[in-house]
């Protein structure tokens, strides 16, 4: 029973931390590993003070293959310029066929005293429809310009 109260208290403390103001827009590159297409163009749009929409688009094989992911993210402040974030979403991939997958994301970001945002994240993906099967993992580092 003590463990239940401890976990509940810990989660309550985490989710009541106020987020920094996130920029209205950010665009840049996401360099990933795993089941992906390498570098992706990444765009973020703030929805509220601590929520945002992220869209990632990767192109490969002379633009005949693509991967597009949409994520809804929650952002929390860690320290003055550090945030952590988590989110859920889905995407579509076209390689040898077309597939639809579900995705989640968790990461940490550093907001420089300039319009540069640097982040490191982990994005697991699971195939829902098409040629995708099983769970794949994607670690990435991103560099974005905020405006």
Image (spheres, rainbow, N blue to C red):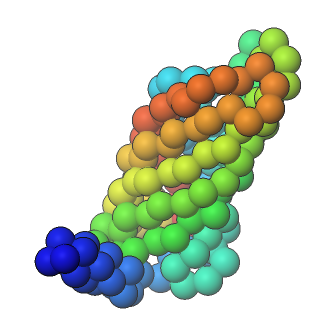
Task: Provide residue 41's location: percent of width, then percent of height.
Answer: 65, 41
Name, please, the residue furthest toward the left.
Answer: 2
Q: Which quarter of the figure has residue 4?
A: bottom left
Would you place residue 4 above or below residue 35 in this image?
A: below
Q: In this rendered view, identify the residue nearer to me: 34 or 24.
A: 34
In the rendered image, the vertical position of residue 5 relative to residue 74, given as above or below: below
- Estimate the x, y position of residue 18 in percent, counting from the top left: 38, 86
- Residue ID at (61%, 70%): 52
Front residue of this view, candidates 42 and 113: 42
Residue 27 lies in what quarter of the image? bottom right
The quadrant in which the N terminus is found is: bottom left
Q: Is residue 83 left or right of residue 105?
A: left
In this view, 113 is above or below 94? below
Write the residue at 50% across / 24% down: 34
Relative depth, front residue between 65 and 12? 12
- Taking the spot 55% from the left edge, 50% from the top edge, the residue there is 104
Q: Could one spot residue 106 in this view of the protein? A: yes
What quarter of the picture does the C terminus occupy?
A: bottom right
Asked if residue 96 lies left or right of residue 126, the reply is: right
């Amino acid at each position: 029973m003590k463990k239940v109260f401890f976990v509940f208290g810990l989660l309550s403390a985490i989710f009541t931390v106020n987020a920094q103001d996130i920029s209205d827009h950010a665009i840049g590159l996401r360099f990933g590993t795993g089941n992906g297409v390498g570098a992706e163009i990444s765009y973020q749009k703030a929805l509220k003070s601590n929520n945002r929409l992220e869209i990632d688009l990767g192109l490969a094989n002379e633009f005949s293959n693509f991967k597009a992911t949409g994520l809804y993210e929650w952002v929390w402040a860690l320290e003055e310029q550090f945030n952590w974030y988590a989110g859920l979403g889905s995407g579509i991939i076209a390689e040898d066929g077309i597939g639809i997958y579900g995705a989640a994301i968790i990461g940490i970001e550093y907001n420089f005293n300039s319009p540069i945002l640097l982040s490191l994240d982990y994005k697991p993906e699971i195939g829902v429809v098409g040629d995708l099967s099983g769970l794949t993992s994607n670690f990435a580092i991103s560099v974005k310009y905020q405006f």
